[in-house]
Image (cartoon, rainbow, N blue to C red):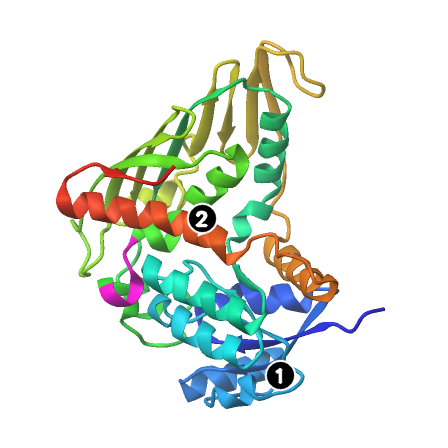
Amino acid sequence: MAKKLGIGMIGLGEIAWKATGKAIEACTDAQMICGVDPVAHVAKSYQERYEIPCSTNLDDVLKNPDVEAVIISTPHYLHVPLGILAAKAGKHVMVEKPLATSLEDADALIAACKEAGVLCSNCLVSRYNPDAMKAKELIEKGAIGEVMALKFFGLSNKAPSYWTGGYTERVYTTWRKSKVESGGGILIMNFVHDVDRMRYITGLEATRVYAEYDTFNTDTEVEDFITVTMRYNNGALGNLLAASCVPGANRIGIRGESVAGNAIYGTKGQIVFDKSLLVYTENEIEGLNKGDWTEFKMGGGEQRTLYVDRFAQAVRNGGRPDIPAEEGRKTLEVLLAAYKSGETHQVVNLPM
C-alpha cells in the first residue's frame, strides 16, 4: 500500500476547523502532518483537537520533509502569496475557494506551480456532491435535451458576528468585510460553488455577464445582495439572485430550502436542486418517469474527503487533479466579470 500523502495545513480557522480537518481524518490516501496559523490560540486549539503539531511559523510546514502538499485555508487575499511560497518549497498546492481575488494573481499561482513542477488544485468540492454528479450523468444521457437556462437562487441572513468571526467565532478578524482582502461578498464567498458546480454539470461556459449589486443591510464594503444575468456558449440563459442580508431568510434555510433553489431547464425536461434532486423528462431514460417527475434522495456525501483522496491519488500516479487550478480560474473569471459589470453598469463579454 502506498504511503499516505502528507499534508500541511496553512490556516487553521473556520473551514479547516469545522470541515477540512474532519475530512482528512477520514481519508484513506492522505493524512495531516502539521499546521500553521498566525494566531497562537487558534494554532494551539487545532493542535489539541486534531493531535498534530501546530505553530505560528510557516517554515514549520514548508520545511517539513514529511509535508508533500499543503491546503491553504486563509483569508482570500493570502491564497496566492502563500501558494507561491509553497510551490517554491516543492509542495503540491490545494487552495480553498476562491483561487484568488484577481485573474493576475490566479495566473501567477498557476505559473509558479508549473515552474516548480507541483500540482495545483482549487477546493471546489461541491462538484463531488452526489446530486451534482447525478445531474451531470442525466444531462449527458439526454434526460432534459438541450440546456435552455440555468437558475441560481439562495437567501440567508448572516449575523453581524459572521463578518468578524465567521460561524465558529474562533478568531476575531475583519477580512470578510474588506473588498480588497475578500474579493467580494455573497457571490465570491458562497456562490462561487454554485457557479462552478453548474459549469461542471452542464459543460457550459458564460460568454456574457450583466450584474447589479449593492450593500443594503450589512456593515461591510462587500455586496450583500446581487443579481446576475448570463448568456452561455450554447445560447442558454442564466439568472442568479443571492443575498446574505434578508431578514427571516434563515427560518427557511440558509440556501432558501423552502423553495426551489438552483435549477437547469432543458428542451425536454428540467432538473431542480432542492432537499432532493427532482427530474422531469419527456424522453425515455432508464430510471426516470417519462412525462412525470422522478425524485432522487442523494444524501450529502463526503465531498472533502473524496477531493483530498483524489488529489493524493493524482500526486502518487503522476496525473492531473480532478479540479486543476485552471478550472478555479475559469470560475473566478465569471465572478470577476459580474463585479466589473456591477461597477460599470455595462455588459462584460468573456472570451469564448
User: Label 2: which residue?
Assistant: 193
| Number of the front mark, 1 or 2 | 2
Judged from this view, the residue extending furthest toward the right is 1
Nearer to us in this view, 28 or 156: 28
User: For the point 66% across and 12% down, which residue is it?
Assistant: 284
Q: How many marks?
A: 2
In the rendered image, which quarter is residue 65 located in?
bottom right
Percent across and percent down for residue 60 are: 54, 89
Q: What amino acid is labelled 2 in the image?
A: His
Label 2 environment density (alpha carbons within 10 Å; few <14, some 14–19, many ≥20): many
**Up-down relation of residue 130 to residue 18 (above or below):** above
Q: Are marks 1 and 2 in contact (CB under 8 Å)?
A: no
User: For the point 64% across and 61% down, which residue is it?
Assistant: 311
Judged left or right of residue 220, residue 305 is: right
User: Label 1: which residue?
Assistant: 52
Percent across and percent down for residue 34 are: 59, 82
- Give, as a single range, the part of the protein colored magenta: 180-185
- Residue 273, visible in the rendered structure: yes
Label 1 environment density (alpha carbons within 10 Å; few <14, some 14–19, many ≥20): some
**Up-down relation of residue 8 to residue 148 (above or below):** below
- Residue 156, visible in the rendered structure: no
Q: Quadrant of the N terminus?
A: bottom right
Mark number for residue 176?
Answer: none
Q: What amino acid is labelled 1 in the image?
A: Ile
- Local secondary structure at mark 2: helix
Nearer to us in this view, 195 or 313: 313
